[in-house]
Image (tube, grey):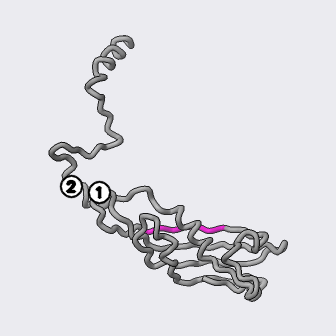
Amino acid sequence: MNINLSKIPETGLIVDEKIELNKDLYEKTEIEEIKNLSIKGSVRYDYEGILNLNLEAQGIFILPDALTLEPIDYPFTSQIDEKIENIEEYCGSFYEKSKNSLDISEILWENIVLEIPISVTNHKSEDLLLKGNGWELVNENKEEIDPRLAKLKELLDEGKE
């Protein structure tokens, strides 16, 4: 999404667009697809000449289920508040000085990537088989004592009495 910086009015530029991010941005992540990505907000210069981006990105990540690897829709919202003082230094390769335009898709991605969850599961997957012949899915919240250390626990409990 390119913004012509020379055409931003004093009152600011109102942004309300549906966009598609380049798939190269999320190629090396868990994201299979980003659907319905919309950007709303404003882009304006303040009294010191600093570019302010006040945007909200909303969309849907398509992520693999942590247990079944089936695709799951995961809605997200990201608030983007960026202040860019020196555009050439801050934005580097996505600022075209000759056209005085700024491609904000990299800035959007830097903020959207923070919304990716570590893992996501579908509620339907609760009925899955969690134990089999020679394997078991371990629940991190469940406290089980290693049988080799059970005697040590008994000694510690005796010491408390």
Dominant SS in magenta: strand
**Residue 128 disc label:** 2
- 111 and 134: which is toward the camera: 134
Q: Is residue 42 left or right of residue 122?
A: right
Under circle 1, the secondary element is: loop
Q: Are marks 1 and 2 in contact (CB under 8 Å)?
A: yes
- 78 and 98: which is toward the camera: 98
Write down the region rendered in magenta: 75-81
Residue type indicated by callout 2? Leu
Which of the two discs, 1 and 2, labels the residue nearer the N terminus? 1
- Quadrant that contains the N terminus: bottom right
**Residue 1 disc label:** none
- 120 and 13: which is toward the camera: 120
Query: Which numbered disc, 1 or 2, marks the residue closer to the eye?
Result: 1
Q: Is residue 61 above or below residue 5?
A: above
> Which residue, given by chain and number where applicable, does mark 1 sit on?
67
Residue type indicated by callout 1? Leu
| Residue reaching furthest to the left | 133
Which residue appears at 71% of the width and 73% of the height? 92
Within 10 Å of disc 2 (Cα), the crowding (few <14, some 14-19, many 20+) is few
Q: Position of residue 129 (x, y in %)?
A: 19, 52
* Quarter occupied by residue 110: bottom right
